[in-house]
Image (cartoon, rainbow, N blue to C red):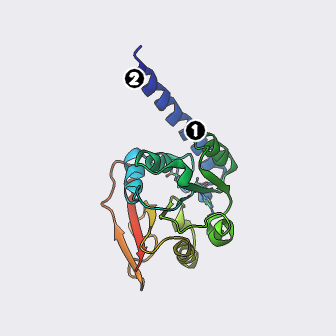
Amino acid sequence: MSFQTTLSIARKNLRIDDEVRFIRSWIEKPLSIGAVTPSGRVLARTMASYVDPDSQGPVIELGPGTGPVTEALVQHGVEPRRLVLVEFNPVFCRLLRTRYPEATVVQGDAYRLKSLLGAIVRDPAAAVVSGLPLMTKAMRTRLRLMADAFTLTAPGAPFIQFTYAVMAPIPKALPGVHAKPSELIWLNLPPARVWVYRKL
Ligand SMILES: C[S@@+](CC[C@H](N)C(=O)[O-])C[C@H]1O[C@@H](n2cnc3c(N)ncnc32)[C@H](O)[C@@H]1O
């Protein structure tokens, strides 16, 4: 068997392991996980594509789960040492620490972003990339999350959020905020869209 074939089998097994972990967590806490399987590669790559790998400062990921978007960020050129990964689930945190030993993994509630990261994120962040199931939260909670994220980011830095919903996860016509959706990503189960918000 060639090295390439062995590598591709190993990757496939890893993906299956991650899916099993994810489904287990979803059975335990469906509302907190918000999806039955990890994001597919096309969605993860689309999320990562909005981050400028040559920018300065940390890249904060909220709700990385088993890390498909984290991996896409690294593949996109973001150095793992720049990553600050905020995840609620202790099993996922352990996995992320093993896979990305240079990243900062913070186990905690992303909706308490300022108190959670105030002492950790010292330089303005280049982006906040969120896989949180925002639609399960009240609108005021979503708005507060984005406002808190903007206090940690550099001017014009993106707040990137995916959703399976037809509607924008955060209203697109907010004063002082520019919002732009991606095309619908059909190659994901279920199809999803990425919204990018920037403070003007
Ligand atoms: C829809 S999954 C997305 C996982 C991964 N980003 C992906 O694209 O496959 C949501 C993730 O957010 C995490 N999560 C949910 N609520 C959270 C919270 N309040 N703080 C931190 N992480 C949270 C869940 O544990 C889960 O890993």
Local secondary structure at mark 2: helix
- The residue lying furthest to the bottom in this view is 175
Question: The residue tagged with tag 1: helix, strand or loop?
Answer: helix
Q: Nearer the viewer, residue 28 or 145?
A: 145
Mark 2, Cα crowd under 10 Å, few <14 / some 14-19 / many 20+, is few
Q: CA distance from mark 2 to mark 1?
A: 24 Å
Asked whether mark 1 lies closer than 8 Å to ligand 1, one says no
Do labels 2 and 1 touch, CB within 8 Å? no
Which of 139 and 4 lies nearest the eye of the viewer?
Answer: 4
**For residue 135, side relative to residue 54 (left or right):** right
**Pick the front one: 159 or 117:** 117
Which residue is pictured at 68% across the width and 71% down the height? 115
Note whether 47 is above or below 125 in the view shown.
above
Is residue 37 visible to us here? no
Left or right of 35? Residue 77 is left
The residue that disc 2 covers is 4
The disc at residue 20 is 1
Q: Amino acid under label 2? A: Gln
Q: Position of residue 41 (x, y in %)?
A: 40, 45
Q: Amino acid at mark 1?
A: Val
Question: Which quadrant of the rendered structure holds the C terminus?
Answer: bottom left
- On-image quarter of the N terminus: top left
Q: Tell me what residue is drawn at x 64 percent, y 72 percent.
A: 114
Q: Mark 1: give few (<14), some (14-19) or many (20+) Cα within 10 Å.
A: some
